[in-house]
Amino acid sequence: MSLAMELRTSGGTLGYDRTGDPAGPLVVLSPGFGDLRSTYAGLAAALAAAGCDVVTADLRGHGGSSVGWPGYSVDAVAGDLLALLHAHGGRGVLVGNSYSGSAAVRAAAREPGAVAGLVLSGAFVRDQAGSPVQRVLVRLFSRTVPGRWLWTTAAWPSLFRSRPADFAARRAELRTNLARPGGYEALRRMTTPEGNHAGTEPLLGAVRAPALVVMGTRDPDFPDPAAEARFTADALGGDAQVLLVDGAGHYPHTEAVDAVAPAVADFVRAVSAADRGGA
C-alpha cells in the first residue's frame, strides 16, 4: 500500500509517496526537472515487492510539492534528498534521474554517512554543450510562454525512445502541474544558470558510495550516451557499474522498467548487505 505524505522543510513542503517494507533498506527516488514522481511508478512497485522501504518524491516546485521555494539549484535539491533520508532513518540509496542525478552526487559528497549508494539514471554530472536546437529550446524554456507549451508538446516527449503505456495520462498530469499558479517556476529556473551542473563534476572523485549508472543507449541529451555513462562511472571515487539499456532514451527506468528494476533491486540488496556486514 502506498501512502501519500509530506515533509515540511524551511523552504517549503515536499510531496512524496512511501511504500514497501519500513524495515527494509531505504531507497529515495527523485525525478528529473519537469517530470513527476509518477515516472517511477513501475520501479517503485518492483522495489517495494523486493522488500525495500521506498520513498518517491516530487522535486521542489513540482507536483505534490509546494511552489514558491527560495531557490531551485542542484545544491538545493541535494539538501531535499538528504532531508528525506534523515526523515526515514538517516541512511539509504538515492535514485536520481537527470537533474536529480546531479543532486544525488552532491548529497553523497556532502553527507557520505547518509548515502549508502547511488543509482544514476540518465544523470547529468557535468554541464553539456548541447546541440544548437537544444540551446534554443533552453532559452525558450526561460519564458513561461512558450516554454510551458514546448515542454509538454515537444521537449519531454522527444526524450523518450519508446513511450510507456501510460504516456498520455502522464503528459496530461504534467500539463496540469505546470498550469497551476507558480507551477512552471521550478522548471523555468532549473533551465537557467541557477540550475547548472558545473559544481558536480569536481565532487565525483570524492564520492565513495557504490553506484549503478543507468543509461539509455539512445538518450538524446548526450552526444554519446555510452561514453557519458563510462565517464561517470570512472570519475566516481567508489565502486561503480554501468547498465546500458539498449534502445532507451532519457528515462530508461520508465521505458525499460523490466530490465532496470531487477538490476536496481540487486544493487540495493548488495549495498544493504555490505552495510550490515560493516556494522
Image (cartoon, rainbow, N blue to C red):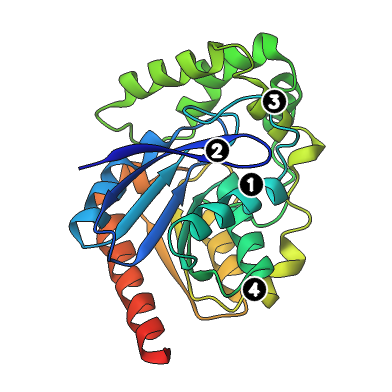
Report the side of 103 relative to 122 (left or right): right
Nearest to the eye among marks 3 and 4: give it: 3
Residue type, label 2: Leu
Nearest to the eye among marks 4 and 1: give it: 1
Please tell me which residue lies in front, 170 or 14.
14
**Residue at the image position 65 percent from the left and 57 percent from the top:** 125
Who comes first in sequence, dot 1 or dot 2? 2
Residue type, label 1: Val
Which corner quadrant of the image does residue 88 belong to?
bottom left
Residue type, label 4: Ala
Are the residues flagged by discs 1 and 2 in contact, CB closer than 8 Å? yes
Q: What element carries label 4?
A: helix
**Residue at the image position 78 percent from the left and 57 percent from the top:** 199
- Mark 4 lies on residue: 235
Q: Where is residue 13 in the image (x, y as percent from the top left)?
A: 56, 35
Q: Is mark 3 on a helix, strand or loop?
A: helix
Who comes first in sequence, dot 2 or dot 3? 2
The circle drawn on residue 59 is 2
Q: What element carries label 1?
A: helix
- Mark 1 lies on residue: 77
- Mark 3 lies on residue: 188
Can the viewer see residue 120 in this picture?
no
Can the viewer see residue 260 in this picture?
yes
**Residue at the image position 55 percent from the left and 17 percent from the top:** 178
Nearest to the eye among marks 1 and 3: give it: 1
Please tell me which residue lies in front, 270 or 218.
270
In the depicted structure, whether residue 120 falls above or below residue 253? below
- For label 3, the crowd category at 10 Å Cα-Cα, with few meaning under 14, some 14 to 19 and many 20 or more, is many
Who comes first in sequence, dot 4 or dot 1? 1
The N terminus: image quadrant: top left
In the depicted structure, whether residue 269 falls above or below residue 94? below
